[in-house]
Image (spheres, helix red, strand yellow):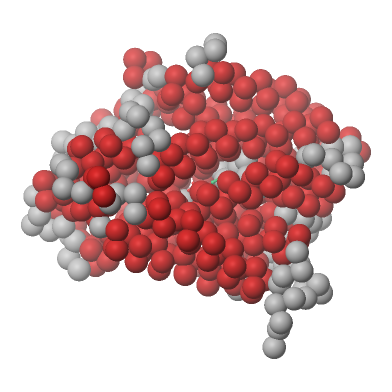
Amino acid sequence: MSDGLDTTEKRGQWSGRWGFILASSGCAIGLGNIWKFPYITGENGGGLFVLIYLACIALIGLPIMLAEVLLGRATQKSPVGAYRDFSAKGSPWVIPGWIGVLAGFVILSYYSVVAGWALHYTWLSLQGGFAGMDAETIGNTFGSVFADGNLNLGWHTAFMMLTIAIVLGGVRDGVERIARILMPLLFVMLLVLLGLAMQSDGFAEAFSFIFSPDASKLTRAGVLEALGHSFFTLSLGMGAMITYGSYLKKKEDIVSASVVISILDTVIALVACMVLFPIIFSYGMEPGAGPGLVFVSLPIAFSQMAGGAIWATVFFALLVFAALTSAISMLEVVVSTVIDETRLRRTAATLLCGTAIFLFGIPSALSGTDGFAGKEFEDLTAGIFGEGKGKNWFDTFDYLASNWLLPLGGLMIALFVAWRAGAAAREKGFNEGTRFQNLYVAWLMLLRYLVPIGVVAVLLHALEVI
Ligand code: TRP
């Protein structure tokens, strides 16, 4: 039996290139793609927002992803140790590493609550879904789900237990194995739903909504959201990709792997929009419905559709799968840091961190209770997510973490790798295992200049300085 203390436990490793790509895609593709991206696209008027988001992914996100994976693979450490290994002794650069771990801790605590709604909606769909319910009833269902503290606590507990169970299994037998099963399933389910959406009347309208730029709806906050979301969706800025990179062998090609992961993530987000919006438009719903989009507008559409209960079950199960492979990445960052920095071994570290995050998530699970109960649905969502950011734990966390912490964390990583890390180690880290060595200089230039300037400009723009 283990006493929970062991310094000899071997560090995990992916089985190979595809193990890494699948696990990292699982990490990147999550609620961000299927729940959040469609609703923020809807709120920000489509087209132009999508365009800015795509530019952020290609010019800022991708270079940072490479920097993170490089740092992880070169040091074979999670964020704190990776920063430490690449800087001078006693350097303050470990601080952004710790902030990243903290961000993961905070994000998972409320992410699990949203995943809990997805679990609950899968359960409702399995029981026959929303057939026969009218729009108001479905709207009120989400309102009352949110206001039901015990229900939220229950699903939050269930989801955290699932997440903990997988991370207990370790890198290859837990994280990679579940990604190998769930990711292909997710792709197939999404394609099936896309087939359904393409046959609906709203497809053309949805297509032009997503792709034709309209500047009138985009605000300063919208630009910040596009940037923040590009970090959130690629899981950047808190060291998740450092950690996943640290389980990668030196002979693998991190350049092509990062490109594949970014493309997969972006395609899935766009496909999610092409599934949701046609259905939304076909049934005359509003694209700007906010966070309730997949929990209210979509079920309303399903309730009127032939075979709606089955489609609803497929959709919400897909949402749960996407959430699960992302949640395990956040827990893995925290656990792996604790394993690296203390003498705890995986079992003890996972149980400890998982429980702590679960407890920290309780206020988010309860954020729909008290003052909110009994209000009309619109009031409820306006109060929770509306104009005045920061009205409760749940909303405050999401806003601060995705729009501020992650971009700042990403900025730190870019500055560190581009300006602080030793030139030789950096170049070797990039080139090892790749055929794309000719891209090194272009990548370095992006990371040195465009990334920091871009991130700082968007942050200053949001603060109304520029
Ligand atoms: N990218 C995931 C999503 O889109 C969320 C996520 C997982 C994440 N790991 C992360 C976000 C690390 C930031 C940092 O849902």
Residue 132 point in image, percent of width and height: 8, 57
Residue 206 seen in the figure: no
Task: Name the side, left or right, on which 89 lies relative to 441.
Answer: right
* Left or right placement of residue 167 versus residue 314 in this view: right
Residue 462 on image: x %, y %: 50, 20
Asked if one can make out residue 411 in the rendered structure from this viewpoint, the answer is yes
- Quadrant containing the C terminus is top right
Up/down of 57 relative to 301, above or below: above
Looking at the image, which is closer to me, 428 or 373?
373
Which residue lies at the image location 66% right of the left edge and 20% below the top edge? 453
| 265 to the left or right of 301 | right
Residue shown at 32% from the left, 59% from the top: 152
Quarter that holds the N terminus: bottom right
Residue 429 drawn above or below residue 316: above
Residue 61 on image: x %, y %: 61, 35
Place residue 444 in its image quadrant: top right
In the rendered image, the residue lying farthest to the top is 466
The residue lying toward the viewer, choosing from 270 and 91, is: 91
Quadrant hosting residue 47:
top left
